């Protein structure tokens, strides 16, 4: 009887001491085998603690993938813009699951979308979708050369500065002038290579527009530029700016975002930085820069101040939407266009 | 004094005398402990989503300090899984005793100079000093819990009986101190019966059970401090002379005899820590919390110095000053040594200390208890949802009510402290005014606690 009870007690104790750990790890293992799904654990640490782990995820074309994303330290976000995946918040200790089908061969960068730490922007990774039949064929999602490269713009060259107008150029005042503008000015692709000051010079040289003041030319420019915009692109631009740019450049674009104020030294990797983020309300500089130039800067980053590159994360539409938002700091736009 | 013997009820008596207790209790709490260690070491580092943090430092803590200790004294010690593996190895049995309660240890004797609560005081101070990290960082918490169990196992294999519980456990120390207030006690019914009983099976052991694991001779029990309610003596007493009793609150604090310096210091440490915790962990001063968390930084060393000084010198020093003043005022007190008075009056801090811990615990337990539901479903923060509660949001429970609970708790503690202080003066056959400086000390502490809670 005694031996029987001892054996029973031993069994229960062993069940607790050995069975419970086995149950915990076994259950977790079992959860990772879902028929028809490849389960990948993705852990996001702040960059100083290691960033995304794993940083590179390789999946086969046609695979259905379940990403289990953990954020052990602080709140992170997760986005793979080219695959349309966007998780705005991953709270520490919570697990977010994202399912996608690898339907297209390519390299698809992913990134944290929350300002998680000093070097937040370094928190990047890449999903590689390969065709098992030809695993070396891996185009990037951006196949076309960016406009600034097509135009051969040197992003780091000094720009001319302009004499700023007295008042911020206003689209409404430009409309009220009531003159007919060259139709190409309504085409954003025509506008992109030119700095506003160059278009301003072209307008001023137009004999049909003689008699207008410089301020009126600037207002006409604002009016013409407004015609290239849509409300949707403005909303996209504002959303991305708020998510990715405002922390340094500030909500108002003045370069005094909470992370920007800390410059120099915003990045642990660039402790010697001497200048801070650009002030987009400085229209003498803004009007000297073409959309193509701004695209290049956003796309490449750097600038000697540790600005992140966004080229690998934005689609073309998103990129131009962000450029438009930057441009909007120099103009007074009509209310109906504003998000 | 009125007492109700619970063991006169045959069912309860039969239950307590069963050899399946306390094993059955321990195998219920052991899985929680194992899961807490697993979650702490392998689960999410986010404390509020980790079973090891939430269930140990919120749920278990709430149960111990708000329920077990005030209502049942050391009952938790009978359920605690930490000494269980060591004890089972020591006994080479789970349920039934081998060879009249023989223990398989190296047979080392616990050094006499280490008797008492001093090591428990040091262990508690050590844990308390690093508590900002231990209570919030699962991996650290997990290693601390694992270390408790390893030390318990090692001490069980080397020494006789439960020296870990008796002399080392930092939790057991304060539970023992505050168990003096509890309305539950285990005592012998008639000491003369024990005196006449030559075998002393309650201490030596017998075929029915082990000698007291807590190294206590039940007939000498006058206070709850060192009785772990393991019920071995109920099983081994052949004369049915041991009883579990319900008694008036704070019964152990009515007599001044048997008061000790190590226990007095436990009272100072507990009271000071409750105040420091209220300041640092739940107070509005983020800089204090950050400093306590920044272990190893220059500011942390300052914090450590202040913390230890306050516990070991500052608060006891202020108290000593009050006792010295009382000695000058009280006629008969002057005949007692300052050390004796210091120790005796320090027991006034027992009810105040428990009240302080109760008030402090109410503030964070009600606010944070809702973290328990998600970790129940997802103990390791791995994205599980076992019971469908993983997504339950954090919701503070009755936050508006907390001050209304804290204030009476502190006031009851203060009244208890004043009662013990006056009782101590009376026990010394001194006039009540001898206790007034100590009463003032307790009132000042009570006011400080009230200010921190509702001020």
Image (tube, coloured by chain):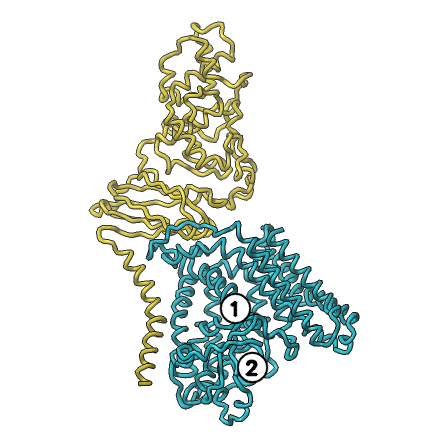
Any mark on residue B221, and which? 2
Q: Earlier in the sequence, mark 1 or mark 2?
A: 1
From the viewer's perspective, tell me whether residue B214 is left or right of residue A291. Answer: right
Against B425, residue A322 (above or below) is above
Tell me if I can see residue A162 in this picture. Answer: yes
Q: Residue at x 36, y 71 (%)?
A: A17
Q: Disc 1 marks which residue?
A: B69
Question: Is A273 left, or right, of B375 in this rendering?
Answer: right
Residue drawn at x 68%, y 59% as measured from the top left: B444
| Residue in view at x 43 percent, y 87 percent | B101
* Label disc, if present, on residue B343 of the rendered structure: none
Q: Is residue A193 above or below residue A10?
A: above
* Image location of residue A116, percent across then percent down: 46, 45
* Quarter assignment of residue A272: top right
Residue B382 to residue B252: above or below: above
Please, which residue is most extreme toward the front here?
B2
Determine the secondary structure under disc 2: loop
In this rendering, the answer to whether A109 lies above or below A189 is below
Q: Determine if marks 1 and 2 fall on one subunit.
A: yes
Mark 1 secondary-structure assignment: helix
Chain identifier for the yellow-coloured part of the image:
A
For the colour cyan, the matching chain is: B
Residue A12 occupies quadrant: bottom left
Q: Quadrant of the N terminus of chain A?
A: bottom left
**What is the residue that sits farthest to the left in this orientation?**
A133
């Amino acid at each position: 009887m005694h031996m029987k009870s001892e054996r029973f007690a031993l069994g229960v104790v062993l069940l607790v001491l050995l069975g419970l750990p086995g149950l915990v790890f076994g259950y977790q293992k079992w959860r990772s085998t879902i028929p028809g799904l490849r389960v990948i654990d993705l852990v996001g640490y702040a960059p100083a603690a290691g960033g995304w782990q794993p940083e590179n995820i390789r999946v086969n074309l046609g695979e259905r993938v379940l990403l289990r994303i953990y954020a052990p330290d602080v709140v992170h976000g997760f986005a793979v813009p080219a695959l349309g995946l966007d998780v705005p918040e991953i709270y520490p200790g919570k697990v977010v699951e994202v399912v996608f089908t690898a339907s297209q061969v390519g390299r698809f960068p992913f990134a944290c979308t929350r300002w998680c730490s000093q070097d937040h922007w370094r928190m990047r990774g890449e999903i590689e979708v390969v065709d098992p039949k030809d695993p070396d064929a891996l185009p990037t999602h951006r196949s076309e050369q960016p406009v600034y490269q097509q135009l051969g713009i040197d992003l780091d060259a000094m720009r001319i500065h302009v004499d700023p107008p007295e008042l911020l150029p206003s689209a409404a005042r430009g409309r009220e002038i009531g003159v007919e503008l060259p139709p190409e000015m309504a085409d954003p692709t025509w506008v992109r290579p030119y700095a506003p000051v160059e278009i301003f010079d072209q307008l001023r040289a137009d004999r049909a527009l003689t008699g207008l003041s410089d301020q009126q030319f600037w207002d006409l420019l604002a009016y013409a530029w407004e015609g290239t915009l849509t409300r949707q692109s403005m909303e996209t631009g504002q959303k991305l700016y708020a998510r990715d740019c405002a922390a340094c450049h500030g909500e108002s674009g003045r370069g005094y975002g909470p992370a920007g104020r800390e410059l120099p030294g915003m990045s642990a990797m660039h402790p010697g930085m001497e200048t801070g983020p650009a002030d987009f309300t400085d229209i003498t500089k803004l009007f000297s820069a073409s959309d193509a130039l701004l695209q290049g800067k956003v796309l490449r980053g750097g600038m000697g101040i540790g600005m992140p590159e966004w080229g690998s994360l934005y689609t073309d539409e998103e990129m131009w939407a962000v450029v438009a938002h930057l441009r909007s700091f120099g103009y007074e736009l009509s209310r109906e266009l504003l998000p | 004094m009125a007492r109700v013997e619970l063991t006169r009820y045959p069912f309860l008596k039969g239950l307590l005398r069963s050899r399946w207790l306390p094993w059955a209790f321990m195998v219920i709490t052991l899985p929680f402990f194992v899961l807490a260690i697993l979650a702490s070491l392998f689960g999410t580092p986010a404390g509020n989503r980790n079973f090891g943090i939430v269930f140990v430092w919120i749920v278990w803590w709430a149960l111990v300090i708000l329920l077990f200790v005030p209502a049942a004294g050391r009952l938790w010690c009978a359920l605690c899984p930490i000494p269980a593996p060591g004890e089972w190895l020591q006994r080479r049995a789970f349920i039934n005793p081998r060879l009249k309660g023989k223990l398989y240890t190296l047979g080392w004797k616990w050094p006499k100079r280490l008797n008492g609560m001093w090591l428990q005081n040091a262990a508690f101070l050590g844990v308390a000093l690093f508590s900002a990290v231990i209570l919030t960082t699962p991996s650290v918490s997990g290693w601390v819990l694992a270390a408790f169990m390893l030390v318990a196992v090692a001490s069980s294999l080397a020494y006789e009986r439960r020296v870990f519980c008796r002399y080392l456990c930092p939790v057991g120390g304060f539970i023992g101190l505050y168990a003096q207030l509890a309305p539950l006690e285990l005592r012998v019914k008639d000491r003369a019966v024990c005196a006449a009983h030559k075998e002393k099976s309650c201490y030596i052991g017998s075929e029915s059970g082990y000698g007291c694991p807590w190294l206590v001779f039940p007939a000498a029990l006058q206070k709850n401090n060192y009785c772990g309610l393991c019920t071995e003596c109920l099983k081994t007493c052949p004369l049915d002379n041991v009883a579990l009793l319900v008694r008036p609150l704070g019964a152990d604090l009515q007599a001044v005899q048997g008061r000790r310096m190590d226990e007095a210091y436990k009272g100072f440490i507990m009271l000071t820590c409750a105040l420091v915790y209220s300041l640092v962990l739940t107070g509005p001063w983020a800089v204090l919390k950050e400093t306590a968390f920044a272990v190893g930084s220059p500011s942390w060393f300052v914090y450590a110095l202040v913390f230890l000084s306050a516990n070991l010198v500052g608060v006891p020093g202020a108290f000593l000053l009050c006792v010295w003043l009382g000695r000058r005022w009280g006629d008969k007190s002057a005949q007692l040594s300052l050390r004796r008075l210091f120790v005796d009056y320090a027991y006034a801090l027992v009810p105040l200390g428990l009240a302080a811990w109760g008030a402090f615990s109410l503030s964070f337990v009600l606010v944070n208890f809702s973290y328990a539901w998600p970790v129940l479903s997802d103990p390791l923060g791995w994205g599980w949802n076992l019971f469908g509660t993983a997504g339950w949001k954090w919701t503070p429970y009755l936050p508006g009510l907390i001050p209304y609970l804290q204030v009476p708790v502190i006031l009851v503690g203060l009244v208890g402290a004043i009662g013990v202080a006056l009782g101590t003066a009376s026990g010394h056959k001194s006039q009540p005014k001898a206790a007034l400086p100590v009463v003032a000390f307790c009132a000042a502490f009570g006011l400080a606690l009230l200010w921190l809670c509702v001020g």
